[in-house]
Image: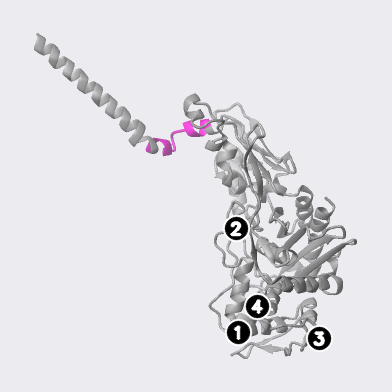
Amino acid sequence: MTRNIRHAAVFCALLLVALVVNAARVQIVQAPEYDDNPANRRPDIARYQQPRGDILVGGKAVTGSRDTGEHLRYERTYANGPMYAPVTGFASQAYGTTLLEHAEDGLLSGADPMLAPLPLWNDVTGAPNPGGDVVTTIDGAAQRAAFEGLGGRKGAVAAIEPATGRVLALVSTPSYDPQSLSGNSAAATRTWNRLNADPDKPMLNRAVSRTYPPGSTFKVVTAAAALDSGVIRDLDAPTRSPDPYTLPGTRTKLTNESDGCRDASLREAFEWSCNTVFAKLGVDVGVRGMTSTAEAFGFNDDGLRVPFPVARSTFDTSVDRAQLGLSSIGQYNTRATPLQMAMVAAAVAGGGQVRQPYLVERTTRAGGSLVAAAGSRPSREVMRPSTAALLKELMTGVVDNGTGAKAAIPGATVGGKTGTAQHGVGNSGTPYAWFISWARGDGDAEPRVAVAVVVEGSAADREGVSGGGLAAPIARGVMEAVLGG
């Protein structure tokens, strides 16, 4: 009898051990598999059980949360959704997160351990943290000016504060309302399918995720390289440039849209955007010198984040002399995001120094206490201060005397550079209209804003596509908004 009891006790102990081992296997070994199982809704239910933190512009929330009363209780809402979509992105119960909603998801959702009042607090209490808030660098007036300036046209605007790198405006059109994707209803699915099928790509952030041939706005980079290298020493000296200019090693003749480019000085060539002069200057500087200057401005950088990633702007380093000539006028394989070209203008405005752009000023807990602040960003030297001073002079001349007259602002000093970028096989595509600029109010010691605008022309207005005509007025509106703020 005693032996039977002992055997039964041993058997029960083995069952208990097996139960404990199996529970451990399920909770530790197989936990990731169960967590990732699409049928497991517990993480989603927990994630949407409380309101999401907000994204703020000028101290006001441009996001919110709506209580649906369903299992996935809180849906994201947006104020002026299409205008701020290139900044916020979307937070969708069905399609995940993008842009700031993605880059700051841990903080906004409450999952970031930094939100806990004490270390291990959540492990002890089992309670989630309220979502934190993200305070952006965006200037609401500048954002609105850019959005309304672009109107219904395809294009993008990026604006930066040169002294700090703060992103003041980031706009892409056509846009969309991210609130229409927030839930998991059939309507959200229909909207998702419609937006993805739209040939105008409203969910594409053209300001940071698309690169364009920068056209003549790249001549700022070429002029910087020529001045820094000593190829040009006097803005008013003849450049000994023919018109047309035969690209080295070819029979291809490069021409100009305007007259008076033969043997023009750098000042004249810059004001009237002479292709022949700048192609020759790029060839004279050489691949190494042009590459060094372009990369100092930020081209060929894979690591730029604001905090979401920015597409790589490119300057081809494996070109022959003819290709270098085309690259130096912003054609061939030269490509840039609008944010990159705003950095080019900011480097000139900043006396030859450029700071990495950033979009988040600080993050806070729900009660307002600080989690993290951006702090001062290190600057890097792009060109000599003397070169930057000469480029300021050249860019001011474009607005005062040249192709950028529509960017002029009474009571302010404005520098700019127009561009009309050809693209497509045999330049068959509708040109892109570019304008980059900076502005300093009469009471300011230094320029307060640098802007880049690109407008994708349509076939209907192909003949009227120009940086000075389409893009410069939009840049002026953004600069006026910042200077008037």
Q: Determine the CA span between mark 1 and mark 2.
A: 30 Å
**Local secondary structure at mark 3:** loop
Between 18 and 202, the one lying in front of the other is 18
Q: CA distance from mark 2 to mark 4?
A: 23 Å
As measured in the structure, the alpha-carbon distance from the residue carrying label 1 to the one carrying label 4 is 10 Å
Front position in the image: 386 or 106: 386
Q: Which residue is label 1 attached to?
A: 322
Q: In the rendered image, which residue does mark 4 sit on?
A: 328
Q: Residue furthest right?
A: 410
Q: What is the secondary structure assignment of the residue under circle 4?
A: loop
| Residue type (three-letter) at the residue carrying disc 1 | Ala
- The structure residue drawn at horizontal position 57% and vertical position 74%, both measured from the top left corner, is 316
Give the image location of residue 212, x and y in percent. 64, 67
Q: Amino acid at mark 4?
A: Ser
- Label 3, label 1: how many angstroms apart (C-alpha)? 23 Å
Pointer 1 with pointer 4, Cβ within 8 A: no
Asked whether, in this view, residue 119 is left or right of residue 333, the answer is left
Tell me: residue 420, above or below residue 118.
Answer: below
Tell me where the magenta segment starts and ends, as one range.
Answer: 33-46
Residue count near mark 4 (Cα–Cα under 10 Å), binned few <14, some 14–19, many ≥20: many
